[in-house]
Amino acid sequence: MQEITLTEASKQLPELIEAAMSGEEIVITKDNQPVVKLTPVSTERRSLFGSAKGLITISDDFDEPLEDFKDYM
C-alpha cells in the first residue's frame, strides 16, 4: 500500500492511476489523514445465465392442488 499526500497525488495522478490499475493500493492523505483509496474497478463479468444450475429444484407435484384448498375445488 502506497500513501501519498493530496498535493503530490494531484501532480502524479496519471502514474497513480496506472499503479492502481496494475493492482497496487494507493491511499491519498490530507492533513495526515487517509481520505481516498485508489483501487481498480473490476471489469470481470460473471456469467448470469446458468449460474444457478443445480441450486434450485422443483418437486414433481408442484402444480398439483394443495390439500388445504380441496374444499374450494
Image (spheres, grey):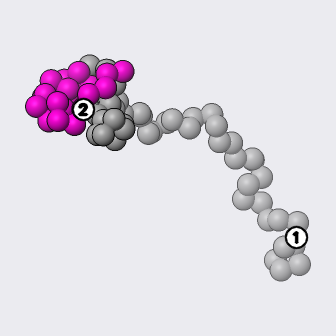
Q: Residue furthest bottom?
A: 72
Residue drawn at the location 33% of the way across and 35% of the way down = 32
Corner quadrant of residue 70: bottom right
Residue 58: x %, y % from top left? 70, 47
* Residue of label 1: 68
Give me the C-alpha separation between circle 1 and circle 2. 69 Å
Residue 33: x %, y % from top left? 36, 38
- Classify residue 15 as left or right of residue 3: left
Residue drawn at the location 51% of the way across and 35% of the way down = 51
- Classify residue 32 as left or right of residue 12: right
Residue drawn at the location 23% of the way across and 21% of the way down = 19
Is residue 48 visible in this depiction of the protein? Answer: yes
Q: Secondary structure at mark 1?
A: helix
- Closer to the camera, 10 or 61? 10
Corner quadrant of residue 52: top right
Residue drawn at the location 36% of the way across and 21% of the way down = 1
Amino acid type, label 2: Thr
Mark 1 vs mark 2, foreground winner is 2
Q: Secondary structure at mark 2?
A: strand
- Closer to the camera, 39 or 65? 39
Q: Residues within 10 Å of mark 2 (few under 14, many from 20)?
A: some
* Residue of label 2: 5
Mark 1–mark 2 contact, CB under 8 Å?
A: no
For the stretch drawn in magenta, what is the main secondary structure?
A: helix
Is residue 41 visible in this depiction of the protein? Answer: no
Mark number, residue 7? none
Q: Is residue 49 above or below residue 19?
A: below
Amino acid type, label 1: Asp
Residue 10: x %, y % from top left? 14, 35
Tell me which segment is drawn in magenta.
1-21
Residue 44: x %, y % from top left? 34, 30
Between disc 1 and disc 2, whose residue precedes?
2
